[in-house]
Amino acid sequence: MNRRGIIYGVGVGPGDPELMTVKAIRLIQENDVIAVAGKDPKEAVAYRIAAAMVPEIGHKELVSVHMPMVKDRELIALEHEKGARLLESYLDQGRNVVYITLGDPTIYCTFSYLQEIMEKDGYQVELVSGIPSFCASAARLSMPLVKWDEKLHVLPAVHETDMELKEDGTYVLMKSASHMKQVKELLQKNNRSVSMVENCCMDNEKIYRNIEEIPDDAGYFSLIIAKEA
């Protein structure tokens, strides 16, 4: 009986290939099966980031894992099961799998759902941290997220349509694009200094340093940092 392989959930960072960790690069280089979310792995942002640092990734076996962006929870659960079973089929052959993901695999990452299924099935899963988008965005804005005893609140704005920003400290609003107009109206009611980075660390990056500059039709990879004024 073959020894089962290990699956690695590997964060490739926010967009700049030079922000990939040495460990992420090494794991991609050392393993032959690379899994990526999406219909075409080579079109995925995570793949393009990794390919810039590890060109030989294009010669490895690329596995496409379908992760639909829909609200139907039953459909999502079904696709997660299918994705986990697909990855397990490689692990059962004794092959390791490197699942690459944008940012960090512990922060609002779809791989988390696959991890839960595979761990229940008895497979070994290891996570490799990457630079989170909100840390990279703060660096691009040349601002500290928090100092001394300030609190940091990280919210997925796409799911928090009735959120309020009543707590002290800095708010990070991730995945804000689909509700940008509503999010801007909320922020305007609060006495906060607002900045946003769109497509952080990518070629088409845009930086907005106040709420008036932020467009209602901002792209999917838009992250807002709202600090106390």
Image (cartoon, helix red, strand yellow):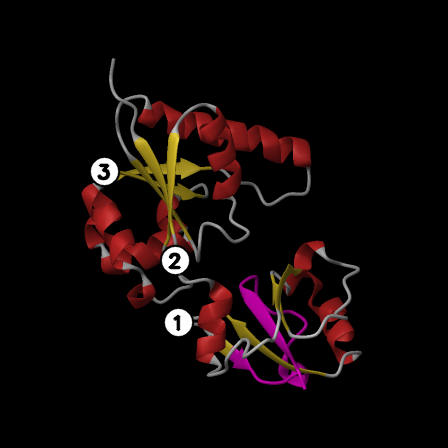
In the rendered view of the protein, which quadrant contains the C terminus?
Answer: bottom right
Q: Is residue 161 left or right of residue 178?
A: right
Q: Is label 3 in a helix, a strand or a loop?
A: loop
Question: Does 133 sit above or below residue 225?
Answer: above
Q: Is label 1 in a helix, a strand or a loop?
A: loop
Q: Is label 2 in a helix, a strand or a loop?
A: loop
Crowdedness near tag 3: few (<14), some (14–19) or many (≥20) residues, C-alpha within 10 Å: some
Residue 12 in percent (x, y) is at: 36, 56
Disc on the earlier residue, 1 or 2: 2
Circle number at residue 82? none
Q: Label 1 vs label 2: CA separation?
A: 19 Å
Q: Is residue 52 left or right of residue 178?
A: left
Please give the range of residues in magenta.
207-229
Q: Amino acid at mark 1?
A: Asp
Disc on the earlier residue, 3 or 2: 3
Q: Which is nearer the eye, 168 or 59?
A: 168
Circle number at residue 32? 3
Q: Is residue 61 left or right of residue 134?
A: left
Crowdedness near tag 1: few (<14), some (14–19) or many (≥20) residues, C-alpha within 10 Å: few
